[in-house]
Amino acid sequence: MFKSVIYKEWIKTRWFIILLTLIAILAVGNIFLTVQHNMSFKEASNYWYQILFQNSHYFSYLKFVPLIIALALASSQYIPEITDKRIKLTFHLPLRENRILIMMLAYGTASLLISYSLVFLIFLGLSNQFFAAEIVKLAIISVIPWFLAGFAAYFMAGLIILEAIWKYRIAYFIIAAAFLLLFFETGLAGSYEPINLKLTLITLLSSISLLFSAYRFRKGEM
């Protein structure tokens, strides 16, 4: 049954996650084409000075890429479940509702992890080609919250999409939007270092939000 659930999720989402990952990789490539251009016309020392002392973020184009991937994955995975209330058929499989949702959640989380890892490793590798370790460290600290935001958005998007009652859906959306703003505060490169661990823990806690759908289903509220 586990393989069947995972295969069903793969069929629904495979083209979305593959296409968006490729687009994200192209976005990273575009970032470093710009970096190469700036280094050629401004000289490396001047460009590094701008990054270190004038708060110039060479990685800013990456800001919303993980979020877009996560929302697209959540939409492709969960919207089919609410079409004609198919989620009720899913919940009537010979497995507990929580287990089915955990399987779906695990699949989506693993898909995001693979996608984000590819994008992040390419970003890290190219950063090391162009910049000193100090600049790369600041960049990594700065982009980590954006990838965490992607995971958090995926977890909460599932809850919002599966919610059947619109007033609750709107309330969840407002709460999720306010929560996600924490990951996108503007500041100096590396300024998120003191709270990245806390954001990671909060993101992990948000992963259980989808199980509230199973609870409401058992209570007959969906």
Image (cartoon, helix red, strand yellow):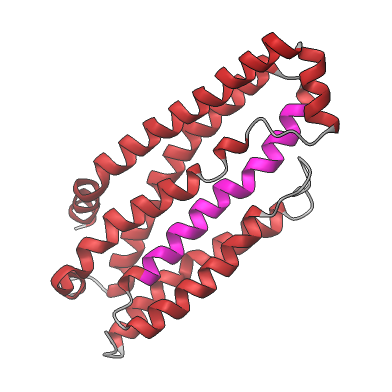
Residue 107 visible in the shown view: no
Q: In this rendering, is residue 111 above or below 159?
A: above
| Quadrant occupied by the N terminus | bottom left
Q: Position of residue 67 (x, y in %)?
A: 48, 50
Q: Is residue 32 above or below residue 117?
A: above
Residue 151 image point, x, y percent: 49, 54
**Residue 183 higher or lower than 111, as above or below:** below
Q: Position of residue 216 (x, y in %)?
A: 34, 84
Question: Is 152 positioned to the left or the right of 109 in the image?
Answer: right
Instruction: Work out which quarter of the rendered image holds the C terminus and state it.
Output: bottom left
Whether residue 207 is in magenta: the answer is no
Going 41% across and 64% down the picture, which residue do you hit? 157
115 left or right of 3?
A: right
Name which residue lies at 77% across and 42% down. Answer: 190
In the figure, is residue 108 to the left or right of 172?
left
- Using the image as rendered, state which of residue 143 and residue 102 is in the foreground: 143
Measured along the vertical axis of the image, is residue 106 above or below residue 173?
Answer: above
